[in-house]
Structures are given as structure tokens and as C-alpha cells.
Image: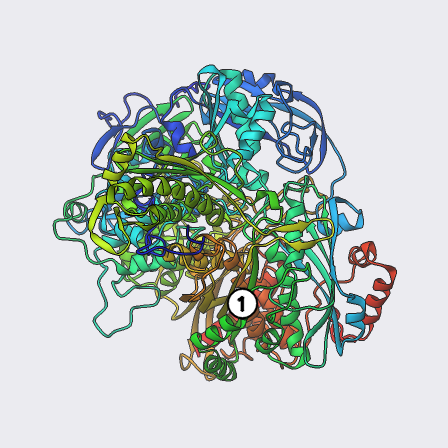
Amino acid sequence: MAVPTVDAPAGVPDDAASEVTVAPSIVVNGRERRLGEVGGHVTLLDWLRTEGLTGSKEGCAEGECGACAVMVLRPDSSIDGATGPGASTWVSINACLAPAAALDGQEVRTAEGLGRPDALHPVQREMADRGGSQCGYCTPGFVCSMAAEYYRAGRSPVVDGQEPAHEHGPNGFDLHALSGNLCRCTGYRPIRDAAYALGAPDDDDALLARTRTAAPAPRPTRTSSPLGSFVRPASLDEALALLAAEPDARLLAGSTDWGVELNLRHSRTRLTVALDRLPELRTLAETDEAFEIGASLTLSEVERGLDGRVPLLAELFPQFASRLIRNAATFGGNLGTASPIGDSMPVLLALDARLVLASAAGERTVGLADYFTGYRASVRRPDELIRTVVVPKPLAPLVGFHKIAKRRFDDISSVSVAFALTLDGPSTGSGSVVAQARIGLGGVAATPVRALMAEQALVGRPFTAEGVAEAAEALGSEGTPLDDHRASARYRRAMLRQSLLKLVEESR
Amino acid sequence: MSTLAERPVNPKVGLEVSHESAPLHVTGAALYTDDLAVRMSGVLTAWPVQAPHAHARITRLDVEPAYAVPGVVRVLTAADVPGVNDAGVKHDEPLFGDEVMFYGHAVCYVLGESDEAARRGAEAVVVAYEPLPSILTLHEAIEAESFQGHQRTLSRGDAEAGLAGAAHRFSGELELGGQEHFYLETHAALAHVDEGGQVFVQSSTQHPSETQEIVAHVLGLASHAVTVQCLRMGGGFGGKEMQPHGFAAVAALGAVLTGRPVRLRLNRTQDLTMSGKRHPFHASWEVGFDAENRLCGLRATLTSDGGWSLDLSEPVLARALCHVDNAYWVPDIEVLGRVAKTNKTSQTAFRGFGGPQGMIVVEDILGRCAPLLGVSAEELRRTNLYLPGQATPYGQPVRHAERLRDIWQILLERSDFATRTAEVEAFNAAHLHTKRGLAITPVKFGISFNLTAFNQAGALVHVYKDGSVLINHGGTEMGQGLHTKMIQVAATALGVPLSHVRLAPTRTDKVPNTSATAASSGADLNGGAIRNACEQIRERLADVAARHLNIHPNDVRFVDGVVTGIGFHDREIAWSELTQAAYFQRVSLWAAGFYRTEGLHWDAERMQGEPFKYFAYGASVSEVEVDGFTGTYRTRRVDIVHDVGDSLSPLIDVGQIEGGFVQGAGWLTLEELRWDTTDGPHRGRLSTQSASTYKLPSFSEMPEDFRVHLFERATESGVVYGSKAVGEPPLMLAFSVREALRQAAAAFGPGGMEVDLGSPATPEAVYWAVEAARSGRAEPALATSAASEAYAAGEHSGAVATEHAVSESASTSPSLAQA
């Protein structure tokens, strides 16, 4: 590619700590393909297409439509290797967001690799026979999202005579698996029917068989193009050394934000450092004092790992973007960008979370409330990374997360409100009084904020519609909501007020 | 020769088959325009330089810095155009203009060795602008009297007298947002120059012949020197009827100038900011009902926002005017239509083509007036449905009007409407914070291009010696299943199995002078042409077979690849043997087919005539549930009965109905185009220019329970195999969602009150409607601004304006006045 050359980053000496001996490559549909000089800027989607695998499409280039969805093989647990060697799982991700280099050494499956026109995969068969494709452009992405759910180990049919869970098929298919895929032609009904008609994979199904052995381990990667370099350090120490030497480096986890920057805003960076597979950032632990969540676990992994143990987070996950995004996005990335509309922040504020920041000089812990300093700005130094998110115990017993958006699946909040309350007296009903309150807000200011006025107005009041009226008014006056394309300021304020009244109603 | 509607024994039409490309779709093997570029070497990428002003004069264009970017090969500007520098047919759309007419307008294009090089090159181009005053909103345009094209009035009887004699009179306004097509495949073209200077353009276009014409006139070539091919589109919805031409012309120009293939594929933001959308509309209206709640007079002004150039705005407006009545008899009516000129993208065709914007006016009127008249919306609508013998305001008899009432009755039964109405009432009585609504609305939609000349089509059918069949027609495939239906039509007409028929890509060197695949007419027109070609071949083969079987040619029957005689089956000849025999007898095995829709007439100036071959009918019932805290809602169940004639392909038709319905619901409830209308530095910029800000329906919006029923025994005489068009009409079935939301919002209030619902009815709009209902008053819809007064005064007589003022004085609400 004929573009201006950029000097190699100083922090990437040839004799770096980790020895990179293998030329970067990805196993696509069972065949290893060299990555070539992709650097950090060529997305997995663009790379696949230049390889002639044009089944994956670009529909939006920002992870909203899923036309680019592909499957990747991942360790089947929230923590690498925690379930012992062997188990792996197919997950679907947006190929338009991930740099191709981030998949070095990994296994990818596209629609072309599931079946052929004359030998369709069961998912492809159901989609084709039931009218699940019209123009066909979104279809390969749907097929990949659907196939990942088809192979999900936990998917099991409901017992005869029982009703499936909400938005689940009788075969256990979770419709949220398709929440990041858009179709403009069908109106979705035939796609849902196809998904709900899927049986279990045959025992000798090759992709199922593949999940019985371990997913490829991450491997140190180093690739350069004239536009910039991509480095996957082998260890946390190496990563921290790199950050200390290269404060301008772009830190990468799920690339769900950076991918948008790359594609839509044409952002470029001299050095991309991938943190998403560092073992030190992928631990999940519960102690007597807290839950400690590794910053580079994907949200899907955290959801599976916590399994409802933090109820407010359990409310958050299904409302956070889409499954495709949650399979890549991390708390570290969401907090690292410090965007005021990220949905995890209000929840973590209500949970009184703390962040462990690590640098070559050592570690420090910062309360999340003190972390944000302005629009997309935080106290994190360029040489620091977010290592762990700590959610202290005990958890407040009464929680709620209200996300206000135009669309229920995969939309950005107009406002979001997270409640964590402790009541005195009976847990419900008019006899209870608010003892403690933490409320986190998104979308009302340049940073996520705590609703301190409303919290104050709540404490000591009966937890009834009348009792919280004053606090609801206070909540409605928190922050400085804007008029924009998502909602009017007036509606945002109304929704802040209503959220507390709705919480009372839902808690009855 | 059988009639066009008649089906032979064992027809292949009517079979439930899936999309002919489905196995290719699901495996990623189906190719789209930009997928072809990967398979070609030396391809250059074109990237636009987009202007950051709503309206400006270009004072300097310096492309030299782009050439300093490595990998940049060429910059295309107006100076490079050898032919006519125009991308449209109205000659009001310079391909490279010296004036910026909307924010994001392409000033020039940079060709690079890669995306990255072209993009960097485009960033390097230096353009100096002199900003000019801009007009963005419909209100601004009306105030400034910024209109374009013809103004038309559709009238019948004496609207004034109709209103004067009414027992109940109301007036109001309605403002409708536009809609982005959001085909998943953005605009794309790939051009190269063959030997002999022949220009070959692969384009994602619904109208290859017009793409060909415009590429030719931009290049200064005759049409025979340009071939356009469209394999398939990743969605069109009308957005690729007129708009692909300029992009194809840029790619072709680049290919001619560089001698290398050039691809141009817009990314989503470019597509959203550069290509046209569904027209936003404003409507002001006065309506009268008699003592039996029958519509007796309607007067309205419809103003569409055409954007910066005409494009298809005039025919879109004509269709809007022709559909203001929807399914209802209005004896005295006068509707003025006009197109505003604004500094926005040039709005264009979009499924329904103005029909939805016209029809919603009367549906809005009925939904708002029903509570004021003290009747249910269901009864008010049913009362006013057309009766057999009545005609539309433009003078076309409403043939098969009885189907409207039949469909209505069948739908009431299938949807269990009465029982569920009671259930909804009981639910609403029991729930303070959650309310449900249940509504039924009809659709009557005219089928044919309003412009009579477009109602023609051609086809080319080849039968090879071995009996295999290759068909080619002028229609394009955008997901609607046209190719599937055409294969079924050919197999039926020739009496062969579906597997014998293969369809070749749409190309202008195979079938010339085609019409756009639009106006829902693709199957009617191209099906007619294919059937015509097949029948020519079959007649010739019948002669051959008759000699072989020693019977009269009229008695030869072609069924499932076996050719035999009427009434005896011991003697037969296989289709492939027959085609071999025909070859050796030197009988031609291929034919060009042609079809023209008979019986059409349209006087565009007087807005009178019979522009439509027939009407497509349907009705839908929707049930919604609204959360009173937030205004968010769910569509619990939808029932549809729709008339597709005798379906050519039921799986395809149900897919069109469901997809059209959800797309319509998207327009009415969710999809919102927002432009920066402030006087700030980004005035005119589309704020919703990405998938993260422009939200189309996802799984969470699909009806949880979705039941579609095809109206039975519905043979449409005079149309290929008795079928009816299905592409557009179902979109407007979604009105029932909006009306159900209106009823649910009303349930939060005391009742008997008008509910004005913003459009689109987003959760926020529904919340304000709920709040208005809760507080026992109607939400002021549109303040009577200077602009809206200009509406009333602008084109109507002064008497109307006075009348308007009178009717507003005795008001039940600021927006809706009862005289």
C-alpha cells in the first residue's frame, strides 16, 4: 500500500522482551492465512474481504448492524483456562471493529466456512428454507450470530409442556444472540422462526467437536504497516514497559470504540497495544469484601462468570449494546474511554466501584466517583492501564437499572439511571424507609455522575410514591441534559423523575 | 392462447419456494457489486470530497495537494466531464457543481490505489467556500416560498360546499418526518472499459437503463457504448431508483480517464449524507362529517420537502395526492400539492412513493376525530370505506371495492377483534401505569406507474437444444424475490420443472429501454414479458410436437417437462427431445417478449384519469402496550389480511408483507432523521448520519405474535397468472401500530378527547401524548406560526384562510377545532 511511512515506534525495539517468531496469521475456516503487513489499522473485515472472503459485509462500519459478524473460538469460561484445558466456545463478533492483527493465531469461521450452497449447515438450511433471507446482504452475519448460539453449550430445549423463557425459543435459543444484527427486508419473523427451529448439533459436527479442545492461546504479536504498528505484549510487565516508553500508544481491548474511530473518523495511531488477552487482566474473584473483575474480560464473560451474583450488573448486561458487542467489549475499555453515555458507568457508580490502575511504577486504587475529570477524560495517566474493577460488598439489596432509549435492543441511552438502595423495615410496602441510596446517572452531563441531591432527598423517607416525590423532583434537576437527536432535554429530565417512581412501582 | 390470469395444470407459480438465491445468501456466496471489485485486479477506489456547508459557492478548488498523497492517481472534477455534467434526468443535478446545495454535497472525487490513499487524498483537497443563505425546514421553505416543479391540485365536486354542509367540522395539521432507506448494501458501482471503448458498469441500481443513459450522457457516448449490469442489490426500497446514476457515472468517468477499473462504494455515513430519502411532508387540512359520521368534505394542502433538486419529487407528490383518500369515499375534495426546495439531500422514491404520506393524512384525521365524534375509530373507518360503484377523486372506479369490506370482516374475525377490545378495556381498567391499544386500519393502493409510458417491459428467453432454459428480463433483484417469481412464471409458461430454468443477471445489452424496478410493478410487467416470450416459443414447439404426436397444435399440453396431447397420455415426448427435434427442424428456440399494461390513462395536469391497472387491498390489526412512566411500548400482536391476487409465490409474498409492515412501523414509530437547523457552524448537517444514531427496527420491534393471511379466491384478471403486486402496499398496513399507540395513550386520560401523536411516534412522542391525556387536555401539536399561516394563505383562496381562522376560533384544542 502506497502511503506515507511512519517511523517505527521507539518503544518497540526488535529485541523486545517477548520473542515473536511466528509470522502473524489467522486460521480462517480451517485454513491458515498469513496476515501480511496489516499493522494496527486493517480491520478483520477488510482483511477477510481482500483475501476474497467477501461473504462478510460492511453495513455500517461501527458494530451496529452485524452484517460483518464472524465466529471466533474462545476459551469457554470467564477466565482463561479456569475450567481446565479443553473447553472452548464459538462466539460471534463484529469483524468491522477488530483489527485483523488482534486475531493473530486465532481461529475464525465465516459464513463461507459453515457450509456450501450444495451442502448447507443446519443454520443455513433453516434460514434458506424459511424465507430468512431476502436481499441476502445481512444474511452471512445473521448466520454467524445464529450459529454461535446454536453451538452454545448452555442452550437446551425447554421441558415439554413448559413455556420458554421470555425471548427464548423452545429449543433454548436466546433471541438476544441476534440483538446486534439488523435486517431491513424481512421484518425478522422468519429469522426468529429459523432460530427457534434449530435442533442440537450432531455429535460428529466438526465445529462442535472443535469446542471439546482448547481454543488457541493468545500469542505475542508484532506487525507493522506504513501507517503504524500493532503489538500484543506477552505479559503485563511488558505491556507496562511499553506504555511507559510510548505514552501515545492506543490501548486496545475489545476495539468496540476504537474500531468506530478507525472507520468513521479515520483516526490513525502510530502504535496499538492490545491488552485484551493479558492473563493478569482476565481474572474474576469473589472475596468476603468484594468482587474483583478483570478489566479485560469481555462483558459476556463477566456475565457468565458472575452468573447473577451482582444483581445490578445482571440487569445491565442484556441492555448493554448487543451480544456481538458484549462478546468483545470490556469494562476496561468502557471506563478507559470515559464516555458519558457508556452504560456501565452509572451502574458501577451506584455499586460504589473502585478501579485498580497499574503502571510500571506500581498500582493505585481510585474510586470511580473520583475517576472522571471531564468529557472523555479521567485521572488515568497515559502510562497506566485499568487492571481490575472492584465492586465492594455488601451489595445494596434494592437495585434497578433504567435505560431510556428509542430502541430496546442495541441503542445508546438518552439517559440511564442505576439505583442501589438499602431500606429499613420491610423490604417492600409503605413501612419501609430508605436508609442508604446511591444513584448513578448517564447522559446528563459531560461525565457519568452520582445523583447526590436526589440521594440526600431519599434517605430517611418512606419508599412510596408519595415518599419519594421530592427526591424524584431532585433527580429531575440533576445534571444538565441536552437537546439532541436522541431526545429532548425536557424528556430526559422527565425520565430522571419517572425512573424513581417506576422503581417504587416495580418494587411493590 | 389462454388469458393472462389463467393458470395451466400443475403450475409452478403458487408454489411455496424460497428465494432463488437463498443458498447463496446464507453461505456468503452471493455476490454484490463491491464484492466483484476484489475479483478484479488494478482496481482504483473513488472517494468523495464532501462540502461542510448547507449552501455555498465554491470560490476555489485546489486538487494539487491530493496528488502529493502517495497512491492518489487522479482527481475528478467538472473539467473532466466530456459530455453533460448532470446526474439526473431533469437537468437540475450537476454531477460536479460550482455551488454546494446541501451539507455533504460532493465537490469532487479522488481516485486512489486503495481506500486509504483515496481517503487521504480527499482529505488533502483544498476547497474555499463562500457560504450562502440556506433553507432547511419545510416551514422555512414555505415562508420563503421556496418551491420547485409543478404544483398540482386534485379535486372533485365542491370541497367548500361539502365542508359548509357538514354536521361536524375539524381542522388540523400534521408534520411527517422522512425516512432513510438503510438498504444494508450502500450505493456501489464498479466500472471498467472493455475493448473498443465499450464501458461496462456494474451498479447497484433499480433502474439499469436509466443508469446507462446517464453514464452515456456524462461520458458523451451513445447508449450502445455503455452496458450496465446489476447482479443483485442488498436492498433498494426505492433508494436505488434514481440515485445510483451519479455514482455510476463517477466510476465510469474514472475508468475512462485512467484506463483502470474504478470502484465507488459509499460508506454508511456518506450514503446517509449524500443520497436522498423519503420525503418529509407537511399537511394542513379541514374536514367535514355528516350526521352519520360520513366524510362529506376535505380540503388539504400537502407540501413535500424535495431537497435540493427535483429528482422524483413530482411523481411522488402526484401519488401522495392520489392516495389522500386511502380506502374512503370523500365526495367533495380539494387537495393542493407542492414541492418545497430546501438545502438537503434530494429526496427520492421510497417504498410507497408518496402514497404513505398521502394516506396517513386521512388516517390521522379519522384517528383524531373519532373520539370527538363519539364513535370508535373502528366504526368510523368502517363507515367510510368505499362501496362498489364509487370512484376515486381522480375519477378511477374503485374496482373490487367490496374486497375492502370482505377483508375488514375477515380480519375482525381472525384477529378476534371484539373479544380483544373487551380484554384491552379490562386490562386498562386494572392497570394504572400500563395501557394497551388495539386498532384496525385499511390499505388501498394503486398499482402501475402514474406515468403511463413506464408501464412496459421486455424479456429475453433462450431455450437451448438440451431443453435447459435461460431467462433474462429488465427487472432487478433487490431481495423482493422478483427473480424467483420470474423463474416460476417461465417454468409455468413452458410447462417445465423449476430446475430447468436459470436466470441470468439483469443487463442493458440483453433487454433495452427497461423501466425502473419500482412501483411494485416488477412482477406484473416483467412477468408479462417473460410469459409472452415463453408463449412464442411454446407455440412454435407445439407445432413440432403436434407433428410428432399427430394431433392439432392447439391440443398439445406442456406439463412438468413432458409434452403430450389433450386427453391421451400413452403418447408423449420429453421436453428435451422436443427441443432437440425443433433445433433440427430449424425452429427458433428463443424469443424476445414484450408487455404493456393495457387500459391506462393519466392526465397529469388535470390530475384525472385511470392511472392504475388495479388496486391492492389489505387491512391490519395491531395491539400495543405502553409504559406510562417512559412512553416505551411493545407491539404485542399483529394480524394482517392482504390481497395479493392469486399469489405467484406465497413464501415470497408473506415476506414482502411482513417486511413492508415492519419497515412502515419503523417510519411511523422509530426512525428519525434530524438535521442541524440551528444557525451554528454545522447548519444543515444531518445529525443522524450513522447506524448508531439513526435507529431502524431490530428484533425488539417485531410484533411478538405476527399473523399474516393472504386474502383467498382473489384472482386478478388481466395480470400475469392472476396475481397482484405486493412490494409497496403492505408498508401502509403499519398505520394500525400508530393508531393503536394513539388509543393506548388515550387510555391514560378521561376519554372522549383527541390525542395528537407526534410522528414518528417514538417513546418520547408517546410519552408526551400520554402526559397530555393524563392531564386531560390535548397536547398542542403545531403552534400556528407565521409559516403555517402562509400555508393557508399561500395557494388557497382568501376565503379559505378566513374559514380556517373561523374554524379555529371555537376550539376544543389548539390543533383541532370543531365548528
Question: Colour scheme of this structure image?
Answer: rainbow
Asked which secondary structure carries label 1, the reply is: helix
The residue shown at (57%, 20%) is B75
Q: Give the number of marks.
A: 1
User: Callout 1: residue from which chain?
Assistant: B
Q: Nearer the viewer, residue B279 or A364?
A: B279
Left or right of B557, for residue A6: right
Q: Quadrant of the C terminus of chain A?
A: bottom left
Quadrant of residue A157 within the rendered picture: bottom left
Q: Where does the N terminus of chain A fall, quadrant-wise?
A: top left
In the rendering, at what x and y percent does residue B489 appear? 38, 48
Q: Residues within 10 Å of mark 1 (few under 14, many from 20)?
A: many
Residue found 45% across the figure and 55% down from its top: A343
Would you place residue A218 above or below residue B598 in this image? above
Q: Nearer the viewer, residue B578 or B172?
A: B578
| Residue B320 shown left or right of residue A243 in the figure | right
Q: Residue A135: x percent and y percent?
A: 41, 46
Q: Is residue B624 visible?
A: no
Instruction: Give x and y (percent) for residue B576.
Output: 24, 39
- Residue B2 shows in this picture: yes
Comparing A329 with A187, the one in front is A187
Foreground residue among B383 and A9: B383
Residue labelled with disc 1: B736
Relative to B612, is B138 on the left or the right?
A: right
Is B747 above or below relative to B76?
A: below
Residue type at the position of mark 1: Ser
View extreme (left): residue: A204
Vertical side of B281 occupied by B233: above or below: above
Q: Residue B94: x and y, percent?
A: 66, 30
B519 relative to A150 in the view: left or right = right
